[in-house]
Image (cartoon, rainbow, N blue to C red):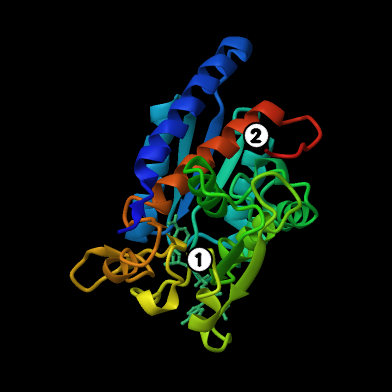
């Protein structure tokens, strides 16, 4: 049976580290790192995500503000709010919860966030820095995946990581991170997507397999090499209301050496790395970008 990689417990450990650093930051500067969350519309899942992120801010002693806008908000109005937050010295990180209502072009909004405050790491400047090996912020979910591996003593260096999913927020930045010539990376990376053929033949090559596609029970036991490490990023709401990952956990845990559960795996780590990035933003804002460890 596989070792369960407990993301909830690891999130608590890292949040305790962040809390201690925030206390020190406050002692030195009299300031608290601050995260401004922007929620447009009334998507129930988005409301829960934003609430959980703000609760996490409270737990670690970080300031947070919620800007709630109606579903009919125009792009111009949202851009005005972001421009204000970009110049607000108390705000170190800006989080625009996606998805946005259809009258708003998400890519325009993501690009409008000042790169230094783009703690999700979604903007093109931050993605470009990441690709160049000069990352300012690692996008939160890939960063959480890397931390789960490293802090559980799972070597990445020299190993073959197979990622299923190539979105700009998970698969693509994770591939960029893990292929870097750097500590905690140096992997051989294969990325699969909806046009890849015979995905099982590719995932079976992986020492580490990461699945991020949004399809419940996609990765079956016969798609995994015995002894591989399996990271499940997926979050799928089943008809009975339960949350399920992209991995058929019950069968894959019998083959894998280690596996993340859903819930309690990558999800809590994503929120934690958002706090991490916001703290780094507060520490570095106004100075030249520096490489993130
Ligand atoms: P996305 O933007 O919808 O991208 C899905 C990716 O999966 C695309 O690259 C797509 O390929 C690929 N794909 C879809 N069906 C496939 C199939 N049958 N075989 C192979 N590839 C397939 O999704 P996302 O935003 O990355 O999210 C993926 C999942 O992770 C979702 O369940 C989401 O809820 C979850 N998620 C969780 C967290 C967390 O904190 N735990 C954070 C973010 C996302 P194409 O590019 O060819 O279309």
Q: How many numbered markers are drawn?
A: 2
The quarter of the displayed image where residue 10 is located: top left
Residue under label 1: 209
Question: What percent of the width, then of the height, locates residue 227?
Answer: 44, 63
Element type at mark 1: strand
- Where residue 237 sits in the image (x, y, percent)? 29, 67
Q: Which quadrant does the C terminus fall into?
A: top right
Q: Residues within 10 Å of mark 2 (few under 14, many from 20)?
A: many
The answer to which of 104 and 55 lies nearer the viewer is: 55
Q: Residue 2, how many percent across, how many down? A: 34, 57
Left or right: where 83 falls relative to 257: right
Question: Residue at 81% across / 34% down in the picture?
Answer: 288
Tell me what residue is drawn at x 59 percent, y 49 percent. Answer: 120
Q: Is mark 2 within 8 Å of ligand 1?
A: no
Q: Quadrant of residue 159?
A: bottom right
N-terminal of the pair, mark 2 or mark 1, is 1
Name the secondary structure under disc 2: helix
**Towards the viewer: 38 or 80:** 38
Residue farthest toward the front in the current orientation of the protein: 226
- 78 up-or-down from 31: above or below: below
- In the rendering, which numbered label is found on residue 35? none
Residue 215 % position (x, y):
39, 75
- Find disc 2 in the rendering and name its residue: 281
Q: Quadrant of the N terminus?
A: bottom left
Which mark is in front, 2 or 1?
1
């Amino acid at each position: 049976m596989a070792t369960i990689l407990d993301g909830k417990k690891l999130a608590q450990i890292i949040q305790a580290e962040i809390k201690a650093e925030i206390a020190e930051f406050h002692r030195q500067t009299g300031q608290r790192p601050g995260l401004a969350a922007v929620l447009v519309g009334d998507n129930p899942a988005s409301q829960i995500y934003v609430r959980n992120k703000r609760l996490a801010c409270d737990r670690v002693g970080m300031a947070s503000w919620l800007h709630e806008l109606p579903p009919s908000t125009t792009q111009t109005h949202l851009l005005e709010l972001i421009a204000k937050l970009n110049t607000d010295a108390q705000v170190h990180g800006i989080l625009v919860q996606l998805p946005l209502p259809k009258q708003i072009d998400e890519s325009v909004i993501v690009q409008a966030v000042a790169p230094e405050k783009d703690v999700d790491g979604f903007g093109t400047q931050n993605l470009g820095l990441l690709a160049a090996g000069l990352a300012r912020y690692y996008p939160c979910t890939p960063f959480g995946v890397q931390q789960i591996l490293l802090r559980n003593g799972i070597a990445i260096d020299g190993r073959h990581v197979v990622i299923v999913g190539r979105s700009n927020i998970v698969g693509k930045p994770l591939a960029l991170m893990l292929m870097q010539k750097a500590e905690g990376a140096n992997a051989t990376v294969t990325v699969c997507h909806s046009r890849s053929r015979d995905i099982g033949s590719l995932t079976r090559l992986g020492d580490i397999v990461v699945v991020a596609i949004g399809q419940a029970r996609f990765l079956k036991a016969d798609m995994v090499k015995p002894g591989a490490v399996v990271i499940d990023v997926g979050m799928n709401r089943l008809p009975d209301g339960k949350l399920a990952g992209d991995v058929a956990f019950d069968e894959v845990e019998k083959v894998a050496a280690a596996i993340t559960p859903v819930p309690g795996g990558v999800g809590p780590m994503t929120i934690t790395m958002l706090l991490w990035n916001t703290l780094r933003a507060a520490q570095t804002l106004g100075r030249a970008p520096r490489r993130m460890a």
